[in-house]
Image (spheres, rainbow, N blue to C red):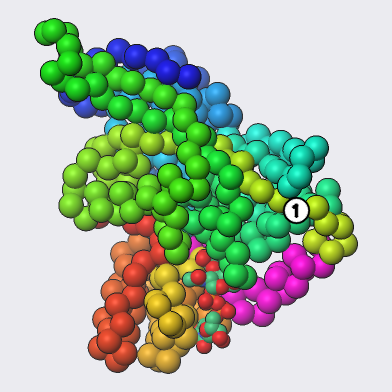
Amino acid sequence: MQMLNKRSSDKQKPIDAQEMHEKFGEQFQSSISLARFTSARIGGVADGLLTANSVADLVSMVTYLWEEGMPFIILGGGSNVLVSDAGVRGLVLLNKAHEVKFDEGTDPPKVWAASGANFGLIARQAGTRGLGGLEWASGIPGTVGGAVIGNAGAHGGAVAENLLVAEILHREIEDKTSKNGNPPGMLIRRENWTNEQLGFSYRSSLIKERVLEAGHTGEETESGRSQGKQPSIVILAAKLQLAYSKRETVEALIEEYRSYRRKTQPAGASMGSMFKNPPGGTAGRLIDEAGLKSIRVGDAAISSMHGNFFINYGNATAADVLDLINLSKSVVASKFGIDLELEIELIGAW
Ligand code: EPU
């Protein structure tokens, strides 16, 4: 798909709740707390929330927001993010596009999944069909899109090893000089990006790197995590490689991983691993050896079970969690000379 779209103006358009209701019905809600859309149950209010239930919704909603010049942030499973207490000024696009299609007629077998589908669920559904290859992902709480952006991994596996292609909606603004006096148009393309184009690295991808860079410098972002911006790349779906196996074999491995996690990872509301493992070490062990386990700020605490999990015991705020993040970083830096790098993303107005 390639289309040259209208571009209203360079000015950012604020949310007009009535217009959004008319256009999207109940899929638009205004002034919604984001806490319940996150696994940590933390986060302030977004000015507006737009829910996409399918890839078709994603395409039409993102196209509309791009054309209208409305800033937005995409939220998937909310499992790898810390949303600020001040919330998000502007629109959050909640990705619940959940279509999944297994392709068992090929070698290797494959699965195509919309970016809002639950990644762990796909791994378990593959298992019931006797398809393996994604067992490592069975306990991953987030969405396919989030897993692709962050090159999610566990138990020695990672997205980069399974991903065949990601379907992307890509916006480019025409070169201003290319038209004779006309305002520049916008090119929206549906593209297939290969593993190489996504530029995977440990718990990261080219898309995520650009987000973080933009977050630090406040410049234009490709994925729109900073406020008042628009992402120019949206992941619509991913095709992943599986392997023929037996249902019992796949389910036994899934159970083995599950029981390892039950023994090593706490069950409470959290963001999963807070920090990336530094080269040659593990974040959990460093925080543990720094004596920081069980430390509490407000209702947020570093788990007594695993140093890289920060738990919300009820009414933790993002500020409480940020205090624990900063404390861990500074104690680990002074004791071991290691800079811990966040695995999670900070979202919203800080
Ligand atoms: N350890 C400690 N103290 C702690 C925690 C861990 O000494 O408080 C030690 C463990 O005994 C073990 C080592 O550190 O020897 C590594 O711990 P673990 O096996 O739990 O793995 P991890 O490196 O902490 C990684 C992923 C998890 C994934 C598990 C299982 C990262 C940052 N984390 O954790 O991923 O579930 O392996 O494969 O890569 C996530 O990314 O959100 C996540 C949960």
Magenta range is 251-271
Give the answer, above or below, for where 345 lies relative to 98: below
* Ligand 1 sits in quadrant: bottom right
82 sits left or right of 155 in the view: left
Residue at mark 1: 243
Q: Is residue 25 visible?
A: yes
224 sits left or right of 234 in the view: left
Question: Which residue is drawn at the image coordinates 17% and 11% (left, top)?
Answer: 179
Under circle 1, the secondary element is strand
Predominant SS of the magenta segment: helix
Q: Quadrant of the C terminus?
A: bottom left
Classify mark 1: residues with Cα within 10 Å, few (<14), some (14-19) or many (20+): some
Give the answer, above or below, for where 235 lies relative to 210: above
* Residue 133, image x, y percentages: 71, 57
Residue situated in front as seen by the camera: 240 or 320: 240
* Residue 273, image x, y percentages: 48, 69
Question: Which residue is drawn at the image coordinates 41% and 64% (left, top)?
Answer: 343
81 sits left or right of 155 in the view: left
258 within the magenta span: yes
Image quadrant in which you'd find residue 254: bottom right
Question: Which residue is drawn at the image coordinates 77% and 68% (left, top)?
Answer: 253
Q: Is residue 50 visible?
A: no
Question: Which residue is drawn at the image coordinates 50% and 34% (left, top)?
Answer: 192
269 within the magenta span: yes
Three-letter amino acid code at the position of disc 1: Ala
Give the answer, above or below, for where 26 lies relative to 205: above
Residue situated in front as seen by the camera: 79 or 143: 143
